[in-house]
Amino acid sequence: MSTQNNTLSSNINLAHQDIISVNQFDTDLLDYLFNRAEEMRHIVETVGGNDWLSHRVLTCLFYEPSTRTSSSFIAAMNRLGGRVIPITQGVQFSSVSKGESLADTIRTLEQYSDVVVLRHDKVGAAQRAADYADIPIINAGDGAGEHPTQALLDLFTIREELGTLDGLRIAMVGDLRYGRTVHSLTKLLLHYDVSLRFVSPELLRLPLTVMNQVIDAGIDVRETHDVADVIDNADVLYMTRIQRERFSDLAQYEEVKGHHELTPELMTQAKEKMTVMHPFPRVGEIHYGIDHDPRAAYFRQIKNGMYIRMALLASVLGK
Ligand code: NCD
């Protein structure tokens, strides 16, 4: 199926739709999805799950490593009574290692499944898969491109933690060039009245294509190299990992790695009501000493990922 560039919410109906890019979402659809995620939280907290997706099959097809995205989709499917074909433990054990094309792999897996969640190392792979497939494809990250379901759970988390999405000062820190979660979240935030601060080494600044969208949206935006410049004003500090696997020259990675670490000392400069987020994995960007600070939202953020993915799977499968 192919839905790119269509905003889906004309009738707030995600049934049978692909989820490829955050560009598909407007505020009505975001509100709908967040309300459904709240409903999923209630179901999980009260009875653990239900059977809305019984006899439905999800294939998780992951060409890149994953812990949270794959297991939260599996948990989401299980909690709604569905089943999963998990190709997440190394696509090298599938026929991909024999040279099978993405087209054939997708056209095969759709014979068994009702929906495919795809993570791939190439920008645009999810859209290509959606063009080949007749069942919904959900993009779980396409190279340095987008990671729409992560951005949805990130936005949901900001709303849960701070009670609003408007009037916030949001700082994104780290690898803004290759970090697909940053690209997707930034685009979603353009729907709201926010100011944005981008903190990165020079080499890892936000891509111009995304920055131009921020500027065109008339958002108050600034770039800096140092988290200390923004921490006192921030309502949200969105930390990210340097994406080592995206560097063609590892010497460049060595130059920028360890560029930023959020420490308990730095946190003393932050507001009392603010939230620290990270898509994880963290590899040194957030000191473990912060984990019990009430402002550290990253484990709650991880749990929210399951609720958002339950909401997405139920919606896409017409429930
Ligand atoms: C992110 C990803 O894969 O883009 N992880 C995730 O899905 N939570 C972030 C990262 O790998 O740094």
Image (spheres, rainbow, N blue to C red):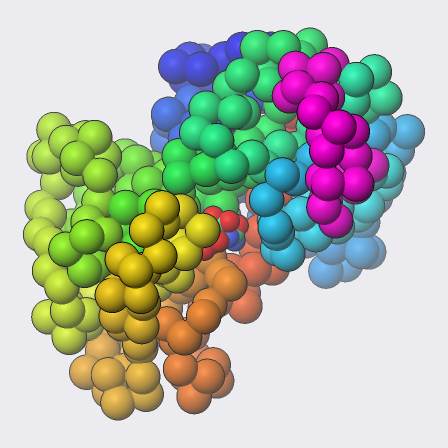
Q: Position of residue 3 (x, y in %)?
A: 50, 13
Q: Could one spot residue 36 in this view of the protein?
A: no
Q: Could one spot residue 122 in this view of the protein?
A: yes
Residue placed at 65% from the left, 28% from the top? Answer: 315
Is residue 99 one of those drawn in magenta?
yes
Quadrant of the rendered image containing residue 225: bottom left
Where's the C terminus, which quadrant? top right
Q: Position of residue 298 (x, y in %)?
A: 48, 66
Residue placed at 19% from the left, 70% from the top? Answer: 227
226 displayed left or right of 164: left
Q: Position of residue 209 (x, y in %)?
A: 21, 30
Compared to residue 280, the image places residue 155 above or below, namely above
Compared to residue 57, the image places residue 63 above or below, namely below
Read off the magenta span. 85-107
Nearer to the camera, 45 or 141: 141
Residue placed at 18% from the left, 60% from the top? Answer: 201
Is residue 315 one of those drawn in magenta?
no
Where's the N terminus, which quadrant? top right
Residue placed at 54% from the left, 16% from the top? Answer: 128
284 displayed left or right of 319: left
Q: Position of residue 179 (x, y in %)?
A: 36, 48
127 displayed left or right of 293: right
Quadrant of the rendered image containing residue 294: bottom left
Q: Residue furthest right?
A: 55
Compared to residue 182, the image places residue 135 above or below, namely above
221 displayed left or right of 199: left
Nearer to the camera, 51 or 189: 189
